[in-house]
Image (cartoon, grey):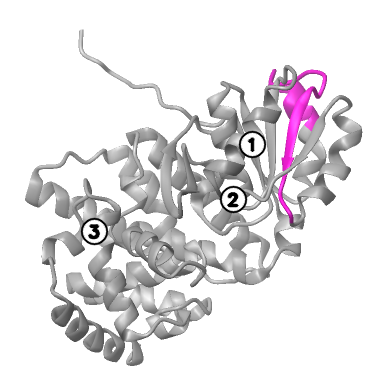
C-alpha cells in the first residue's frame, strides 16, 4: 500500500495576539499540558520576570527560574534545576537565548516545552533547533518542537524595536537559503522537501513586499506567524536547510571570528543580500535590498561595523561552519582576492539601490 500522507511535528497551540499571555494558564490546562500549573517557568533578563508575575496567579504551583541563557553551560545548569522535582512542562518566557536554553534543557529531560516569545528577533521561537554557544562556538542542536507558541503583541511592542526588526532579516533570508537548497539539488542531487520549501517561502515572500512596519499590528502579526512557519519548515524536513544557507554560514562565521558584531537577524539579512548578489539574481537582489533599507536593517559590512578585510575573512571562513552544506559560497569557492573584488562590486550595487 502506498504512503498517502505523512505526520509532522507541530505545536499543539499557536496564539499570536494582544493579551495572549493572560490566557497561558487556561492554555496549559485545556491543552492537557498541565492542569494544575505545576510547571517550571524559565525567564530571561528582559521582560520575562514581569510576565512571570503576571501569570503567577494562574499557575499556582509554578517555580520560576532565571537564566542568562545562550550557552550549553546555562542549559545544563537549567537542566539540573528541572530535575529537582517533577514538572508537567517547561514554560520559557523571553527572547531567543532564553527560549533556546529552555528548549535544550526540556528536551534533555523529555518535558513538554511552551515558548512565550517576547521578541521577534529570529525563527527560533517555534523551531526544533536550539542555537547555543559551546566552547566559544555557536552550534545548532536538534530538539523537540515547542508544544505551544505564544506571541503577545503587547510585550513585543514594549521590547527594543531594533531587536524585533531583526526578525525581518531572518525571514527574508529564507529566500536565499531556498536558492542554495536548489543549487544543492542541481549540483549534488540533494533532495528538496517541497512542503518544507513552501512553508519557508510563503512568509518570506509576504515580508518582502508587505507595507507597514513594527508599529502596525497587522505587520507584526504576519512577521510572528512567518517566523513560526519557518520553524515548522525545519520540523517538516528534519533540518534547518529550508531556512539556512550561505546567509547563515556568514552569521556563524561572524559570531565565531567577531562575536558581538550584530544580532542573528541583522546578519541574516546582510548575508542573504550578499549571497543573492553572488548568484547574480538582480530582481531578488533589488527586492531584498529595498526591503532591508525600508526597515533600516544592515546591508553592507560597514553597517555592522566590519571592515572590508574582516568581511573577507568572514566569507572565507563561512563554509567551515557547516561542512555538510552546499551553498553559493562552496560553489564559488572564492579566494580572498576574489571575495575582495566581489565585495567592491557588491558595495556599488547596494549604493545604487
Give the mark nearest the N terminus, 2 or 3.
2
Above-or-below relation of 290 to 84: below
Locate residue 70, reporting x and y percent.
57, 50
- Which residue bears the numbered disc 1? 77
Looking at the image, can residue 14 be seen? no
Give the mark nearest the N terminus, 2 or 1.
1
**Could you tell me how far apart the alpha carbons at marks 1 and 3 are, in whole angstroms?**
32 Å
- Say if mark 2 contacts mark 1, CB within 8 Å: no
| The C terminus: image quadrant | bottom left
- Locate residue 148: give its quadrant: top right
- Which residue bears the numbered disc 2? 97
| Residue depicted at x 65% and y 28% | 80
- Left or right position of 296 against 32: left
Looking at the image, can residue 149 be seen? yes
- Left or right position of 190 against 251: left
Locate residue 63, reporting x and y percent.
81, 31
* Crowd tier of the residue under label 1, counting other residues whose Cα lies within 10 Å: few below 14, some 14–19, many 20 or above: some
Give the mark nearest the N terminus, 1 or 3.
1
Amino acid at each position: 500500500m502506498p504512503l498517502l500522507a505523512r505526520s509532522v511535528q507541530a505545536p499543539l497551540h499557536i496564539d499570536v495576539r494582544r493579551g495572549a499571555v493572560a490566557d497561558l494558564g487556561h492554555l496549559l490546562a485545556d491543552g492537557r499540558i498541565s492542569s494544575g500549573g505545576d510547571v517550571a517557568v524559565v525567564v530571561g533578563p528582559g521582560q520575562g520576570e514581569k510576565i512571570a508575575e503576571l501569570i503567577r496567579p494562574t499557575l499556582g504551583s509554578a517555580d520560576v527560574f532565571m537564566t542568562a541563557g545562550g550557552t550549553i553551560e546555562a542549559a545544563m545548569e537549567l537542566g539540573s534545576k528541572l530535575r529537582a522535582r517533577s514538572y508537567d512542562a517547561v514554560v520559557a518566557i523571553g527572547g531567543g537565548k532564553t527560549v533556546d536554553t529552555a528548549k535544550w534543557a526540556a528536551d534533555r529531560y523529555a518535558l513538554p516545552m511552551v515558548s512565550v516569545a517576547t521578541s521577534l528577533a529570529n525563527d527560533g521561537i517555534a523551531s526544533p533547533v536550539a542555537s547555543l554557544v559551546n566552547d566559544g562556538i555557536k552550534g545548532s542542536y536538534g530538539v523537540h518542537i515547542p508544544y505551544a507558541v505564544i506571541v503577545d503583541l503587547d510585550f513585543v511592542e514594549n521590547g527594543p524595536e531594533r531587536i524585533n526588526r531583526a526578525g525581518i532579516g531572518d525571514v527574508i533570508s529564507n529566500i536565499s537559503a531556498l536558492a542554495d537548497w536548489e543549487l544543492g539539488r542541481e549540483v549534488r542531487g540533494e533532495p528538496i522537501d517541497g512542503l518544507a520549501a513552501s512553508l519557508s517561502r510563503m512568509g518570506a515572500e509576504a515580508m518582502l513586499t508587505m507595507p507597514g512596519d513594527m508599529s502596525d499590528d497587522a505587520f507584526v502579526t504576519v512577521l510572528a506567524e512567518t517566523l513560526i512557519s519557518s520553524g515548522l519548515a525545519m520540523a517538516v524536513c528534519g533540518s534547518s536547510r529550508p531556512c539556512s544557507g550561505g546567509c547563515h554560514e556568514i552569521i556563524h562565521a561572524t559570531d565565531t571570528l567577531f562575536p558581538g558584531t550584530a544580532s542573528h537577524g541583522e546578519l541574516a539579512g546582510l548575508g542573504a543580500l550578499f549571497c543573492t548578489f553572488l548568484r547574480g539574481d538582480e530582481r531578488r537582489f533589488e527586492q531584498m535590498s529595498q526591503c532591508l533599507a525600508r526597515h533600516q536593517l544592515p546591508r553592507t559590512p560597514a553597517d555592522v561595523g566590519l571592515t572590508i578585510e574582516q568581511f573577507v575573512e568572514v566569507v572565507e571562513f563561512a563554509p567551515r561552519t557547516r561542512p555538510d552544506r552546499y551553498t553559493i559560497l562552496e560553489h564559488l569557492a572564492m579566494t580572498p582576492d576574489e571575495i575582495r573584488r566581489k565585495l567592491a562590486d557588491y558595495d556599488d550595487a547596494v549604493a545604487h539601490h
